[in-house]
């Protein structure tokens, strides 16, 4: 098996066969049988997932950004009528009109990247095939979104402590060999002035996260639902096994914009956009304990299923009302 080195390229790290937290953590939300099924049926990336990937690279690996995206100019909404429907779309430099924004953006992508403006339009299926061939692994984005991405990333970059970034690691959790890639392992003392001094004198491991809602209760909710606590604890264990004396955890949270995703192009929504904001949120003692508990449960479940080659489904139990429903049952009322 190929060794994992700290500066291992992202593509090689992803291809390494050892399990990672991003995959194993989903055992906390589904039966092992469902988990096994989904490993062979990966989920399509959502708009927020793509934006998070691009933000992550812009902050920590800006040299990779050009190979990850391509810019598609905006389409134009016209007053023309296509197929009896008003509000058709067109693209700069073309007399072609399309009934939907998705069709226009697909055409624009094909034309922009083949210098084919003026060539007679063929079919939507052919255009989509062209887009897939031309764009390849890159994410098509609008110029407006790219500018916003850089603005939001700049706020996060200003908060980056001195330390090691994108550290690939290999180790063992509960006897299971696994891998992890820490976003930031800060040098001791470089975060002394952050969070009211909670990091003073400590070596912190930080992970870059994005969410559209950034009030404390919303961040707490996201951390719980998305299993950030278990991820940080897992990475901390791996970091210590790889020679980093990590003794604190935090999240570098970046507020995401409202997005659109039409015709394969990621763009900004016309609705109100949240302000550009980022901050470092420390993980408290209770958060670390919670992370340890959920990480141990996930890794033990994965190891047990793997060793026995048995991936059980949900147990069959009698159905009963939930506790909150029982507690909320109204008392019998007499009528006169």
Image (cartoon, rainbow, N blue to C red):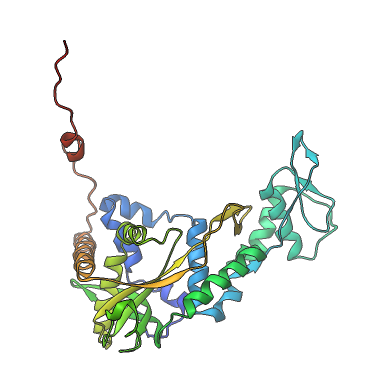
Residue 321 figure quarter: top left
Name the residue: 20% across, 71% down.
285
238 shown above or below 69: below
Viewer-side residue, 111 vs 288: 288
Horizontally, residue 123 falls left or right of residue 10, namely right
In-image side of 212 versus 168 (left or right)? right
Instruction: Tell me the quadrant of the picture where the C terminus can be found.
Output: top left
Quadrant containing the N terminus in the rendered view? bottom left
Q: Considering only vertical position in the picture, is 80 above or below 68?
A: above
Q: Where is residue 326 in the image (x, y as percent from the top left)?
A: 16, 34
Q: Which of 9 and 72 is in front in this view?
A: 72
Q: Which residue lies furthest to the top in this view?
A: 336
Decide if residue 108 is in sight here. yes
Rendered residue at 31%/54% (across/down): 35
Which residue is outermost to the front?
336
Quarter residue 92 falls in: bottom right
When asked about the image quadrant of residue 237, the answer is bottom left
Residue 58 in view of the camera: no
Residue 89, horizontal then vertical, whole percent: 74, 48
- Of residues 122 and 239, the one drawn nearer to the viewer in this rendering: 239
């Amino acid at each position: 098996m190929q060794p994992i080195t700290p500066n291992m390229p992202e593509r090689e790290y992803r291809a390494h066969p050892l399990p990672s937290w991003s995959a194993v953590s989903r055992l906390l939300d589904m039966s092992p049988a469902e988990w096994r099924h989904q490993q062979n049926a990966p989920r399509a990336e959502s708009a927020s997932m793509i934006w998070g990937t691009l933000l992550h690279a812009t902050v920590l690996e800006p040299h990779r950004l050009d190979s990850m995206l391509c810019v598609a100019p905006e389409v134009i909404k016209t007053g023309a009528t296509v197929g009896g429907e008003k509000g058709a779309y067109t693209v700069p430099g073309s007399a072609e009109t399309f009934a939907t924004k998705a069709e226009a953006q697909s055409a624009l992508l094909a034309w922009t990247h083949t210098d084919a403006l003026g060539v007679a339009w063929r079919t939507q299926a052919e255009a989509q095939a062209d887009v897939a061939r031309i764009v390849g692994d890159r994410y098509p984005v609008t110029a407006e979104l790219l500018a916003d991405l850089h603005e939001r990333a700049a706020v996060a970059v200003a908060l980056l402590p001195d330390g090691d970034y994108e550290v690939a690691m290999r180790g063992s959790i509960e006897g299971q060999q696994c891998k992890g890639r820490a976003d930031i392992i800060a040098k001791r003392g470089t975060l002394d002035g952050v969070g009211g001094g909670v990091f003073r004198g400590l070596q912190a491991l930080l992970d870059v996260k994005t969410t559209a809602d950034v009030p404390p209760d919303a961040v707490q909710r996201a951390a719980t639902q998305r299993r950030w606590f278990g991820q940080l604890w897992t990475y901390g264990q791996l970091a210590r096994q790889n020679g980093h004396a990590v003794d604190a955890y935090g999240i570098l949270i970046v507020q995401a914009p409202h997005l659109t995703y039409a015709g394969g192009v990621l763009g900004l929504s016309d609705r109100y956009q949240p302000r550009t904001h980022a901050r470092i949120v420390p993980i408290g003692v209770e958060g670390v304990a919670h992370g340890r508990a959920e990480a141990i449960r996930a890794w033990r479940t994965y190891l047990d299923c793997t060793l026995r080659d048995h991936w059980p489904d949900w147990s069959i139990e009698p159905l009963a009302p939930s506790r909150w429903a029982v507690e909320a049952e109204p008392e019998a009322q007499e009528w006169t």
